[in-house]
Image (tube, rainbow, N blue to C red):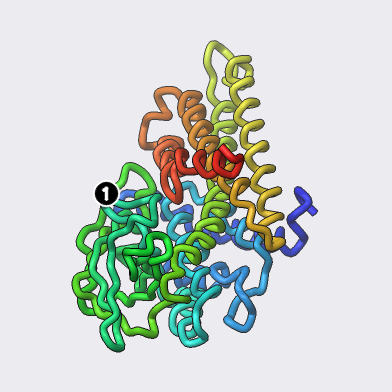
Amino acid sequence: MKYGVFTEEHEAVRKTIRRFVETELVPHVEEWEKQGYFADWVIPRMGELGFLSLRYPEKYGGAGGDYFMGIVLAEELARCGAGGLPMAVAVQTDMATPPIMQFGTEEQIKKYLIPALKGEKVACLGITEPNAGSDVASIQTRAVRDGDHWVINGRKTFITNGVRADFITLVAKTNPDLGYNGVSLFLVDKDTPGFSVTRKLEKVGMRCSDTAELLFEDCRVPAENLLGVENRGFHQIMWELQGERLIGAAGAVAGAQYTFEKCLEYARQRTQFGKPLIRHQVIAHKLAEMATEIEAARQLVYSTARKFAAGEYPVKEISMCKLVGGQVSFRVADAALQIYGGYGYMMEYGVQRSWRDSRLNRIGGGTDEIMKEVIAKSLGL
């Protein structure tokens, strides 16, 4: 078993995904980055190939794979050369849909989860607001029960897949007096009266994924669209966030590996002062340092993923993975850009995109500062 976690089945799936990435995604990345969104056929195509349901039960159309199937997908998608697309897919597979699998009714699973796994419906996760990000307990979006409906009012921002999503897994306050214990989850269809996408946001990086601001104005959602138990949404979503952060860390490390490989190839070919860059000790040592950081981060991710896959809830270790994965991905991209020199700052080389995209890894899904706070608390500090 490679790294003690990947079986022959994992590696067979990896080869299939890599072939898909290289032949069907990479040729279009530059175009998608320029236009600000990837093609609509990508999600349905991935559903058709079974990539969106690798670790979901067979009875719901999934492959019944283990947690490391999700790791394989995240690692291989990172090789497309643009962070926005893997991020959008991760929202579909590891952020907006796991709560439906875990807490949804059979009817909700049939209506939302199964179409999402097939790629027939695009999902997004509605947590962040203009005045509340990492502090989920402070969200202001309000859901009030009115007969057979919930009436929702509020705004969400920085929502990946928000423009194209067919439904939102939404976090809203149902009892403001209860703080963390007054939050609930809802499944909201895009054609629900009172819901609108108010703006497509322009980002520094991750440009081929759509990111939106969402508005809920007296949005009437059927009572049966409450996901899980009323006022238990915070506990339900915090469970989901751990899996999201771990997958995000795996993708960040894989992105760093891809950037490193491209940088190493460049350093072998680029000549300065009569010899290839890699023959200069300062460059060789920098590459050695990059490789070491990547390997250390990868091992931390894999060891933590073993615990998570075994049913443990290693919040401290997951937070460490998120922190280290994000920081390493950016340091590697920054070092790679420096090795490329002036060419690295030109749009014709992909390293500039790695540099821009990797910066979000230290913000999205929980900032470095929040991860340090979680780790400190787990140490009793």
Q: Residue at x 36, y 31 (%)?
A: 346
User: What is the quadrant of the N terminus in the image?
Assistant: bottom right
Along the horizontal axis of the image, is 14 left or right of 103? right
Q: Residue most toward the front?
A: 177
- Between 366 and 14, which is closer to the camera in this rendering? 366
User: What is the quadrant of the C terminus in the image?
Assistant: top right
Residue 25 visible here: yes
Residue 285: x percent and y percent? 63, 20
- Residue that numbered label 1 is attached to: 202
Q: Amino acid at mark 1?
A: Glu
Q: Is residue 257 above or below residue 12?
A: above
Residue 210 visible here: no
**Neighbour tally class for label 1: few under 14, some 14-19, many 20 plus, Cα within 10 Å:** few
Residue 241: x percent and y percent? 50, 57
Along the horizontal axis of the image, is 44 left or right of 346? right
Q: Residue at x 29, y 80 (%)?
A: 145
Q: Is residue 367 above or below residue 277?
A: below
**The quadrant where residue 216 appears:** bottom left
Along the horizontal axis of the image, is 179 left or right of 10? left
